[in-house]
Image (cartoon, grey):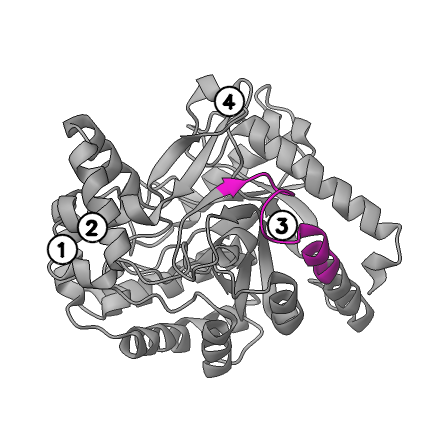
Amino acid sequence: MKQTWRWFGPADLASIDDVVQAGAEGIVTALHHVPNGVVWSPEEIAKRQELVRHLKDGSPSGLEWDVIESLPVSEDIKKQKGAWREHVANYKTSLHNVAAAGIEVICYNFMPVLDWTRTALRWQLPNGGSCMRFDINDFAAFDIHILERPGAEGDYSSAITDEAARRFVALDEAGKKQLARNVTMGLPGSTESMTLDDVRSHLGEYGQISADQLRQHFVDFLSEVVPVAEDLGLRLCCHPDDPPFALLGLPRIMSTAADYSRILDAVDSPANGMTLCSGSLGARPDNDLPAIMDQFGPKVHFIHLRNVKRDTGDLVGSFFEAEHLGGDTDMVALIAAITSEERRRKAEGRADWQIPMRPDHGQDILDDLNRRSQPGYPTIGRLKGLAELRGVMTALEHSQYGLR
């Protein structure tokens, strides 16, 4: 795997110098300041590439912008409302501009309203560190009592609604505001955080859109952009739902292997692929990550390696961001499956045999605790994760287990 690092641009507390010292081999970034649905111009793309290519003193960094994460799909496209046709046209133009700049891998997602969702951004760990957490009871307290979504109670068990009520009563005003802010945090690095009224408005506009209808909207979008990407030599890769189950009464359609099969078969192309995120998919106990890698290996274009620890075996439940080798996913077996796929590709002569990977998320430890970085993206926590993953990769390269 090519070891990459997510960088949020000039405002990121981790500099390009830091990334070089971490030993990463490439950069994952995006133009977060460009509003969703707007064309990414050649000038803005080139500006970001130049930042990636240089250290603070102006000398070459040796790094390139290898993966875009994300080129967002607008809410209008997902709903097929408003300016969605214009946004699809703009997306195609952005793909042309990205290809002209030499970037080939584009990660995106198709989650309605909220992207990744957590109820705590700095949850205290026994060792004094912190991490992100999704607590189904806290989320229900937000959904039922803060957002006051009509009919929300019917989406949860009586045990969860009872506990949600207890937790809501125990919150003071500051606690309620903090919970709402955590849930509506939105896409990492995005300038488009949402108010409660924004969320309610989006929910109203989605109306009665079913999972089948949302899936058809996704296929319609891919039918437009995948042929363009294929002609340009680009590889689009959809990130799974995070968490991988329905929220706020809205369907989520990229949560399981069956979901990916439907979408990848509906628009069958080398340009229509998967971002395998072990943390997102790993939040469901019925997702077997090594098996998913084996099944979709030829179309896995980008990999997020992180781990979560689930509280229970429920399909919809609570979890926290664990250490990279410490959660419910067998990371050694997953990396072995990835290594096997790379060897298969190399034997076939594929130019893209080496799959870009980044250590996703991380726990806040040591000086990270005082830096207040982008939630989920501490410098030291990710460095620790990358070192652990690199150790597994190196060990597998020198063992029969890695040859599968």
**Marks 1 and 4, how far apart at CA:** 36 Å
Residue 24 lies left or right of residue 347; in this view the side is: left
Q: Amino acid at mark 1?
A: Arg
Verify CB contact (< 8 Å) between mark 2 and mark 1.
yes
Q: Which residues are magenta?
A: 321-338
On the image, numbered disc 3 is attached to which residue?
Answer: 357
On the image, numbered disc 1 is attached to which residue?
Answer: 149
Q: Position of residue 317 (x, y in %)?
A: 39, 54
In the drawing, what numbered circle is on residue 283? none
**Residue at 41 percent of width and 28 percent of height:** 11
**Marks 3 and 4, how far apart at CA:** 28 Å
**Marks 3 and 1, how far apart at CA:** 38 Å
Dot 3: within a 10 Å radius of its alpha carbon, few (fewer than 14), some, or many (20 or more) residues? many
Secondary structure beneath dot 3 equals strand
Q: Is residue 58 above or below residue 81?
A: above
**Marks 4 and 2, how far apart at CA:** 30 Å
Earlier in the chain: of badge 2 and badge 1, it is: 2
On the image, numbered disc 2 is attached to which residue?
Answer: 143
Q: Nearer the viewer, residue 84 or 126?
A: 126
Q: Quadrant of the C terminus?
A: bottom right
In the drawing, what numbered circle is on residue 128? 4
Secondary structure beneath dot 1 equals loop
**Residue at 20 percent of width and 32 percent of height:** 170
Earlier in the chain: of badge 1 and badge 4, it is: 4
Secondary structure beneath dot 4 equals loop
Earlier in the chain: of badge 4 and badge 2, it is: 4
